[in-house]
Amino acid sequence: MLYLVVLFCGLFAVSRGQSTEVSACTSNIGSLPLNTYIEGCITPPCSLPQLEDAVLHIVFRAPRTMRSMRTLATAYLFGIVPYNYDLGENAITCNFLNNSYCPVLEGEVLQYTLKMTVESFMPVGTAAPIEFRVVGETNNDAVFCIRVPIVVTAPLNN
């Protein structure tokens, strides 16, 4: 039955054209989630306007039972210099699960929405890959990890 739910979610997302091309992380561990959609982006690099929220919708399977999860974001400036991006309260993954709550059970298929504000200190024109990873109780407790190239664009209100 669980297989059918995962299959349905994947087919639904693909049929609606809501799947962003992401790749496996190169600097952090973690497998790819079942599906990722970044609003407004199918084929990277994804254009992210300053002072707006980038919104990621992610479907993944819990690899084990977990009481808590955190989301970490790292931008690689010039392709190599890591910059840990503070997600603030948005880093508390359990608060943004759409179909469940923590603790989560091993094998549970979870729908997660992440919002990340593109701050003004990220200059317009900045192009960098970003790795988004979800971890359990420790940073080495990988749940999943995605890498996607982005370009910071001018705020929409200009």
Image: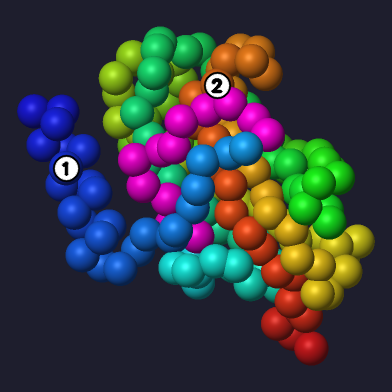
* Dominant secondary structure (helix, strand or loop) of the stretch shown in magenta: loop
Is 37 in the magenta?
yes
- Determine which quarter of the picture holds residue 12: bottom left
102 relative to 4, above or below: above
Q: Secondary structure at mark 2?
A: strand
Q: Which mark is residue 81?
A: none
Q: Is residue 155 above or below residue 144?
A: below
How many C-alpha atoms fall within 10 Å of the one at disc 1: few (<14), some, or many (≥20)? few
Where does the magenta region start and end? 27-38
* Residue of label 1: 7
Badge 2 is on which residue?
142
**Residue 25 position in % (x across, y down):** 58, 39
Give the residue displayed 30% in from the left and 68% down from the top: 17
* Left or right side of 99 for 8: left
Q: Quadrant of residue 128?
A: bottom right
Q: Residue at x 84, y 56 (%)?
A: 78
Residue type, label 2 = Ala
Q: Position of residue 102 (x, y in %)?
A: 46, 20
* Residue at image location 36% in from the left, 47% down from the top: 35
Establish if 83 lies above or below 157.
Answer: above
Q: Is residue 144 shown to the viewer in this render?
A: yes
Residue 61 in percent (x, y) is at: 34, 28
The quarter of the rendered structure image containing the N terminus is top left
Disc 2: CA contacts within 10 A as few (<14), some (14-19) or many (>=20): some
Q: Amino acid at mark 1?
A: Leu
